Amino acid sequence: MSYYPVNLDICGRKCLVVGGGSVATRKVKSLLDCGAQVTVVSPAINEALEKLDRESNLDLQRRSYQSTDLEGHFLVIGATDDMRLSRRISADAESRGMLCNIADVPDVCNFILPAVIRQGDLLLTVSTSGKSPAFSKHLRKQLETAYGAEYKLFLQLMGRIRKRLLAVEHAPEAHKHLFERLIDNNLVDLIRNNKIDTINKLLKQVLGDGFDYADLMKEEPTAKVRIKGEPAGQSQGQEKNS
């Protein structure tokens, strides 16, 4: 199987999770973290989901799954140990042209969830296309070590520099060489080692006056504005059995 990689924007979209155990809980948390409107259907609900229901805008339906539960939803995730139910969910979703993931049963999914490494806006995913979830987990741990919190700060800084530059010149390509110079001059390493004076010297050298690291990092982020050619959103999760 050759999968087509994609990041989904599910913010504000209705997503259904069928199941009330630990696997369902992990899936629900991932969906909520991405801003989805999540409905959970299961006759039995564990304490972790009960807690999520109290702390977030979660819709818990304490009953058995019905085919009509799919209506109005963008995607469905099946997280039960009932294979007959899993195949029913998959068939129902397929008949409606919906995105469907069945935990640990890739044969009845039309998408699988990779292992995820996230540092702020940096999203790295690892998939072995279901061939070796254990190796996917191994790689994820390596990447978690290699890409630390400095990458979160780096992307915050780059995003705020980009916002300022776009306020003057609206063609992103006009600034490409500036960002390449910042990257080539090891800005990530400077942030990792908290070399603030050196960072400010680099910003002045590349961008000119008026770009101070501390000031830029204090700026309030604005609502996301999509630039033509940029991806619309992100998804997260874990590869099967990882």
Image (cartoon, grey):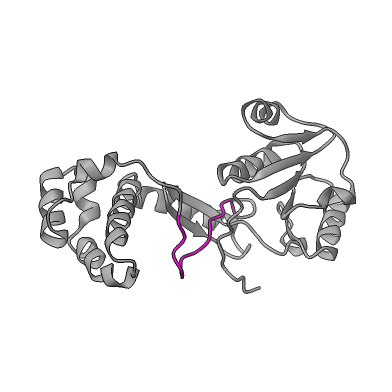
- 31, above or below 97, in the image: above
Expressed as whole percent of the image width and height from the top left, the position of residue 123 reads 46, 54
Main SS category, magenta section:
loop
Asked if the magenta segment contains residue 205, the reply would be no
Q: Quadrant of residue 215?
A: top left
Instruction: State the residue in front, 93 or 189.
Output: 93
Q: Quadrant of residue 48?
A: top right
- 67, above or below 172, in the image: above
**How many labels were placed on the picture?**
0
Relative placement, left or right, of 99 versus 36 is right
Expressed as whole percent of the image width and height from the top left, the position of residue 34 reads 56, 47
Instruction: State the residue in front, 114 or 136.
Output: 114
Relative placement, left or right, of 224 versus 179 is right
State which region is magenta: 225-238
Image quadrant where one finds the N terminus: bottom right
Asked if the magenta segment contains residue 227, the reply would be yes
Q: Quadrant of residue 173?
A: bottom left
The residue lying at 71 percent from left, 53 percent from top is 104
Relative placement, left or right, of 135 versus 219 is right
Expressed as whole percent of the image width and height from the top left, the position of residue 11 reads 59, 49
Expressed as whole percent of the image width and height from the top left, the position of residue 210 reads 15, 50
The residue lying at 21 percent from left, 61 percent from top is 182
- 231, above or below 161, in the image: below
